[in-house]
Amino acid sequence: MVAIIRFLTGYVRFRISGSRPGSFVNKLIKNGINVWDIRSVGGEIVCCTSCAEYPLVQDLCRRTSQRVHIVKKRGVPFFAERNKKRSGLAVGFACFLLIFKLLSMYIWTVDICEFDTISQTAAKDILHRVGIYEGVRGDFESLKRMQTTAMLEFGNLSWMTINADGSRGEVNATEKELPETNDTAPRNMTARADGQVIRADAYSGAVNVAAGDGVTEGDLLISGVVQTELGGVRFTRADGVVIAKTRYLERISVPKECRIAECDEQPSSRCSARLFGAVIPLTFCTAPADHVSMYSEQQASFMGERASLSLIREDIYPYKVKTVKVDKDTAEILMKNKMLLRELFKFSDKNIVSRTTEMSENNSAYLYEVRYICEEDIAAPSPILSDGLNFIQEEEEDIS
């Protein structure tokens, strides 16, 4: 910072020659003249002082036997003096100030806070739709209007602020907290699928089924209304496990002709720069008609702050589409792959006891029917209806 101030005010580097240059430096310091970068070169001393204090150095030199000679002149005052007849520099400087002022009226970087349920990419897309992106005007009224629209677009925010700090936009928000669930409210356990009961274990509540019983979806398995020894009833939060044998039918079709894409060429890439919101191509490469592009963007930073400059790389993967015929063996392999994916996501909480596969075909596809027999916990919580709860509470009060 001191060096910047010295450059703005101007300074000179001068050489002291004579019989006793060291004592002359001491006199300069004693008279309150600020000197720095003192060096001894070939029996002479070279140092620096500000251009405002150099006349004091010359005045003190006249009263001694020493001589001073300017070696270099540095700083804005000397630069302006040398170029005072060059009007183009003044015009260029004025244009620089004007451009700087215009650019400072816009937002060139947008910092988005972290969300728990929304990714940064999704949040950036939502903000872009409402008008908050690199290159937007950063006036107060527009930002407040966009802030209201953005809260409606997100939908799950309790509050949100969008502020402009110079040319940087800051988006801060807090998501709504999920309502606390009542873990003590009375409830039943009902069947969430059709099946045949194998085992029923109640941790709390009264078991309403036995092994071998058949149930349909919605049937009561464990009741949260328990009869007391005195003949009344009490409510409890029913909980337990009801293991049942369930059956599922999955249909999978594999077409006899498939269109597949093959990469038959080496991938290519092209780069571009995003400067103040504008994309500037750096390399030129023509992409084929059928291709897939993958983008990566690297943001530049300066002194820990994100700059309005980023490098975009596009990797281009060309491909060709062709039609192939699928025979029965290949179709069976494809069917097994599809079946494994379905089991991974749909039957992850079930114990598959057996599976049987039946295959048929028509003019356009192979058809597969997969029948599953599973063992699973079919008990699902179900709230006790408030009307029935009030009725039983009134009845309990009458008994007491």
Image (tube, rainbow, N blue to C red):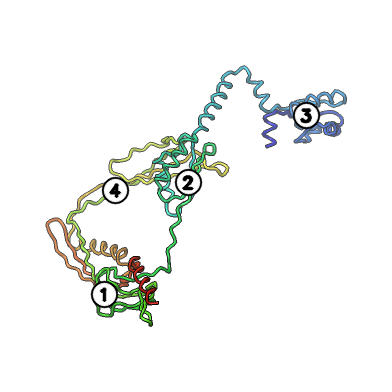
Q: Which residue is drawn at 39% across and 72% down?
A: 237
Q: In this view, does 392 lie to the left or right of 249?
A: right
The outermost residue toward the front is 398
Q: Of tags 3 and 1, which is closer to the observer?
A: 1
First reached walking from the N terminus: tag 2 or tag 1: 2
Q: Is residue 143 left or right of residue 79?
A: left
Residue at label 3? 15
In three-dimensional space, the C-alpha distance between marks 2 and 4, rounded to whole angstroms, equals 49 Å
Residue at label 1? 245
Q: Position of residue 6 (x, y in %)?
A: 70, 32
First reached walking from the N terminus: tag 3 or tag 2: 3
User: Which type of secondary structure does the marked residue at label 1 adopt?
Assistant: strand
In three-dimensional space, the C-alpha distance between marks 3 and 4, rounded to whole angstroms, equals 73 Å
Report the quarter where the C terminus lies.
bottom left
In three-dimensional space, the C-alpha distance between marks 2 and 1, rounded to whole angstroms, equals 50 Å
Q: Of tags 4 and 1, which is closer to the observer?
A: 1
User: Which type of secondary structure does the marked residue at label 2 adopt?
Assistant: strand
In three-dimensional space, the C-alpha distance between marks 4 and 1, rounded to whole angstroms, equals 50 Å
Q: Which of 183 and 316 is in front in this view?
A: 183
Q: Looking at the image, is 165 positioned above or below residue 222? A: above
First reached walking from the N terminus: tag 3 or tag 1: 3
In three-dimensional space, the C-alpha distance between marks 3 and 2, rounded to whole angstroms, equals 63 Å
Whether residue 130 is visible to the viewer of this picture, yes or no, is: yes
How would you rate the neighbour count of disc 4 (Cα within 10 Å): few for under 14, some for 14-19, many for 20 or more? few
Q: Position of residue 120 (x, y in %)?
A: 44, 49
Q: Of tags 3 and 2, which is closer to the observer?
A: 2
Q: Find residue 160 and name its label.
A: 2
Q: Which of 179 and 358 is in front in this view?
A: 179
Residue at label 4? 264
Q: Of tags 2 and 1, which is closer to the observer?
A: 2
Q: Nearer the viewer, residue 349 or 11?
A: 349
